[in-house]
């Protein structure tokens, strides 16, 4: 038996999508992931669990064993198994099977299996959506460029909610539900983000005035991170368009999905 050839074939099927077998494998994997998620969700419904507990238990362990075999096969055929283990999908694949085994020691941990849904991200390889990858990279670079401004913004908001929460704690006190400064800061956070659960409500006139100010402040600062990210995104998109240059007339500034030069009609080089 030629083990290198077997490992190579398994690698092409499990990690690749160029062959029909690889595409079928990924499609089957996604169906299995979604099916296991459906079983997990149904098992959380008490009426369904009471009637079909045995069936759900068997199905869940069937998928767990299948995912375990898949994980071991990935380790077997991967050229660099340790690199796969430390990769994003390697960690997700491991987390996808661990909770079922941990459930023996820690009841209830099986609900962590919801992370399997993350693995459906592999569907982008099957559907050949590589042309959208560049757009996601532009968004990621925009977020990285704006990270210092966003950090300053969130630091300012953190100071505001701390000050406002402390003020409400001093004004309202435990008798009105503001039992501690952390609880009061929690109220300030849900109020300034315009969520306002209503589980803690100021009772005094001064407390209500501060609450009204906090709500208006929340609407005022809501647009700040949006504006920061939008500005960085617009700058990044302009920079990317300038990189798309016509090989004939050297015109730049084409849209990312343009196939031909807007000036001379020459076919543009691939820029995905």
Image (tube, grey):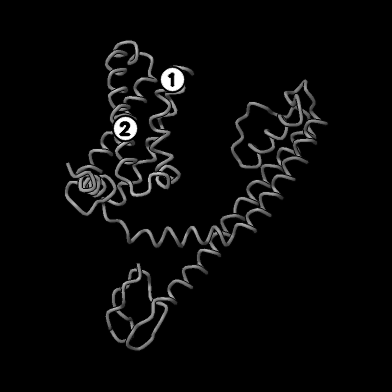
Mark 1: give few (<14), some (14-19) or many (20+) Cα within 10 Å: some
Q: Is residue 154 left or right of residue 142?
A: right
Residue toward you, 110 or 19: 19
105 lies above or below 207? above
Q: Identify residue for label 1.
A: 103
Residue toward you, 29 or 174: 29
Q: Residue at x 29, y 36 (%)?
A: 70
The total number of labels drawn is 2
Query: Where in the figure is residue 238, as x and y percent of width and height?
Result: 47, 72
Residue toward you, 78 or 34: 78
Hey, which residue is sitting farthest right in the picture? 170
Hey, which residue is sitting farthest bottom in the picture? 249
Q: Identify residue for label 2.
A: 67
115 lies above or below 26? above
Q: Is residue 89 left or right of residue 184?
A: left
Sequence-wise, the earlier of marks 1 and 2 is: 2
Query: Where in the figure is residue 121, as x and y percent of width and height?
Result: 35, 45
> At numbered mark 2, what does the secondary structure look like: helix, strand or loop?
helix
Residue toward you, 248 or 229: 248
Mark 2: give few (<14), some (14-19) or many (20+) Cα within 10 Å: many
Q: Residue at x 30, y 87 (%)?
A: 264
> At numbered mark 1, what does the secondary structure look like: helix, strand or loop?
loop
């Amino acid at each position: 038996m030629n083990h290198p050839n077997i490992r190579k074939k398994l690698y092409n099927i499990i990690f690749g999508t160029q062959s029909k077998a690889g595409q079928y494998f990924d499609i089957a994997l996604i169906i299995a992931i979604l099916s296991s998620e459906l079983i997990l969700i149904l098992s959380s419904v008490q009426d369904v669990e009471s009637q079909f507990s045995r069936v759900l238990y068997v199905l869940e362990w069937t998928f767990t064993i299948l995912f375990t075999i898949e994980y071991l096969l990935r380790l077997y055929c991967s050229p660099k198994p340790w690199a796969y283990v430390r990769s994003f999908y390697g960690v997700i694949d491991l987390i996808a099977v661990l909770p079922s085994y941990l459930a023996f020691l820690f009841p209830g941990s099986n609900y962590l299996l919801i992370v399997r849904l993350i693995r459906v991200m592999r569907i982008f390889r099957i559907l050949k959506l590589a042309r959208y990858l560049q757009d996601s990279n532009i968004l990621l670079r925009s977020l990285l460029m704006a990270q210092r401004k966003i950090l300053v913004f969130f630091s300012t908001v953190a100071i505001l909610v701390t000050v406002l929460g402390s003020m409400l704690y001093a004004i309202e006190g435990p008798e009105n539900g503001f039992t501690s400064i952390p609880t009061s800061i929690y109220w300030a956070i849900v109020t300034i983000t315009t969520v306002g659960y209503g589980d803690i409500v100021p009772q005094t006139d001064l407390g209500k005035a501060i609450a009204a100010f906090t709500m208006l402040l929340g609407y005022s600062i809501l647009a700040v991170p949006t504006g920061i990210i939008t500005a960085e995104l617009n700058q990044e998109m302009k920079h990317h368009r300038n990189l798309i240059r016509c090989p004939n007339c050297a015109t730049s500034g084409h849209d990312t999905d343009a196939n031909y030069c807007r000036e001379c009609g020459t076919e543009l080089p691939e820029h995905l």
